[in-house]
Amino acid sequence: MSAYLKAILTAQIEAALCMLTECIQKCPAEHWEGKIGNDTFRQVAYHTLFWLDLYLSANADAFTLRELHSRGGDDRSDSGPSTGLSKDESLAYSAICRQKLQGPSGFHWLPFSRGEAHLYNLRHVQHHTGQLSAYLRRIVQDGEQWWVKSGWRSK
């Protein structure tokens, strides 16, 4: 993959992760357990971070469960939705995923290139970030509109 294309994909995945992180930061404590579809805000945030973490691994065998997964759950299991993490733990997990963004990939169940795997992962993050963002816009009536262009937004 050309350096130019890799830089573009990386910047856009980082921007999607920034948007997800902002959703987590902006969620009021009293709405952390709010329902989004069949799951809670906590569970959707965790699910999104879990799969981002997994797909940013070099391959399925290279993905290792972290200590935080003992609290959040293994989202690959068929035992139902994971419990998720606290808001602070979710923000820390987001930082871990950001660090992994530069690594190589190789998943047998995603039969396409690393570049396409990044786009696939980006769509997954955006899908669930859209759910979280729509939920927050319904419960937080502050009228603020935000869009992250690329990179981490300064506060």
Image: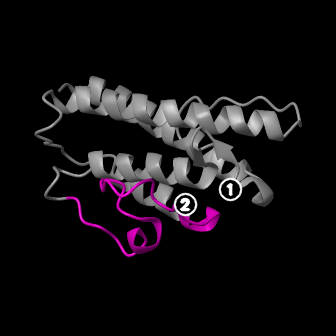
Mark 1 crowdedness (10 Å alpha carbons): few <14, some 14-19, many ≥20: some
For the rendered model, the colour scheme is: one colour
Q: Position of residue 87 (x, y in %)?
A: 63, 62
Mark 2 crowdedness (10 Å alpha carbons): few <14, some 14-19, many ≥20: many
Q: Amino acid at mark 2?
A: Ser
Q: Earlier in the sequence, mark 2 or mark 1?
A: 1
Q: Which mark is residue 15?
A: none
What secondary structure is the stretch in magenta mostly built from? loop
Q: Which residue is mark 2?
A: 90
Which residue: 34% across, 70% down?
A: 66
Report if residue 85 lies within the magenta region: yes
Q: Position of residue 58 (x, y in %)?
A: 18, 50
Residue 77 in which image quadrant:
bottom left
Q: How many marks?
A: 2
Q: Position of residue 33 (x, y in %)?
A: 68, 56
Tell me whether circle 2 and circle 1 mark residues in contact (CB < 8 Å).
no
The span shown in magenta is 63-89
* Secondary structure category for the residue under label 2: helix
Relative horizontal placement of residue 65, taking residue 23 as reference (left or right): left
Which residue: 17% across, 52% down?
A: 60
| Residue 129 showing in the rendered view | yes
Q: Amino acid at mark 1?
A: Glu
Q: Which residue is mark 1?
A: 33
Residue 74 in which image quadrant:
bottom left
Residue furthest to the right in view is 142
Front-lying residue, 1 or 48: 48
Mark pair 2, 1: CA separation: 13 Å
Q: Is residue 94 above or below residue 13?
A: below
Residue 111 in which image quadrant:
top left
Q: Position of residue 149 (x, y in %)?
A: 58, 28
